[in-house]
Amino acid sequence: MKYLVKKNGGITTPQGFKAGVAQTEVKYRGRYDLALVVSECPAVGAGVFTTNKFPAAPVQVSRQHLAQSEKMRGFVVNSGCANACTGKEGLAAAYKMAEFAGEVTGYQAEEFFVASTGVIGNFLPLDKVKQGIKEAGHNLSPQTGTLAAQAIMTTDTVPKEVALEVEIEGKQVVIGAMAKGSGMIHPNMATMLGFITKAFCRHSFVIATSVVIKPSIVAILG
């Protein structure tokens, strides 16, 4: 399959996707550590999740939302705190992240994937996270994709993002992606996070799949 790498491309390169970022200072000062990515129209969602028998709270919430929602609108990710091994309190916090994302965008909480990465065993400071999601939601822009890739970094030395233009069934499709993880893809994706957006480039906000033409968001959560 032939493809073209889009210069300076990333998660918001496909038309109809915007990102917002914030500095919540959950762990570090002076760096972006929260990203919110939103599709401007209903998107087809898909997910690939860790096979760990003790998945973190965000993984549990994202699985549930994907199972119960006919469409997805985006995802919210924080770094610095993994919200893993945090029991009922952590699960409630993950649901709250989706709720905050829904409130600031005007969509349903169930239309958002949730992801967290960072220190295991710590509880999310929800007051900081809520303010960060609110801030990110108010500065959504197609130009913020690279900052979103930076915001999800932990031990990564560089942000990981890419965008491609490919032909699928005779139609030009733009695919954007970002990921985090430094040697974290094994075993079974370990603590890797990856996100993919797609758009059918001749019409804003839609993408081509093998069956239908719709927006698409894919979450890969370790």
Image: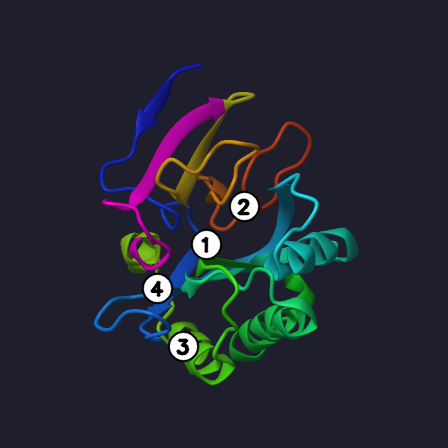
Q: Which residue is mark 1?
A: 16
Q: Is residue 69 left or right of residue 109?
A: right
The residue carrying pointer 2 sits among few (fewer than 14), some (14 to 19) or many (20 or more) residues within 10 Å by Cα, namely: many
Q: CA distance from mark 1 to mark 4?
A: 10 Å
Residue 206 got which mark? 2
Of tags 2 and 3, which is closer to the observer? 3
Q: Earlier in the sequence, mark 1 or mark 4?
A: 1
Mark 1: which amino acid?
Gly
Extent of the magenta region: 150-167
Q: CA distance from mark 2 to mark 1?
A: 8 Å
> Picture quarter containing residue 35?
bottom left
Check disc 3 and report the residue beneath it. Answer: 132
In the rendered structure, are the residues bearing label 2 and label 3 in contact, judged by CB atoms less than 8 Å apart? no
At which x and y percent is residue 41?
57, 58
Residue with the mark numbered 4:
141
Q: Secondary structure at mark 3?
A: helix
Check the picture and name the quadrant holding the C terminus.
top right
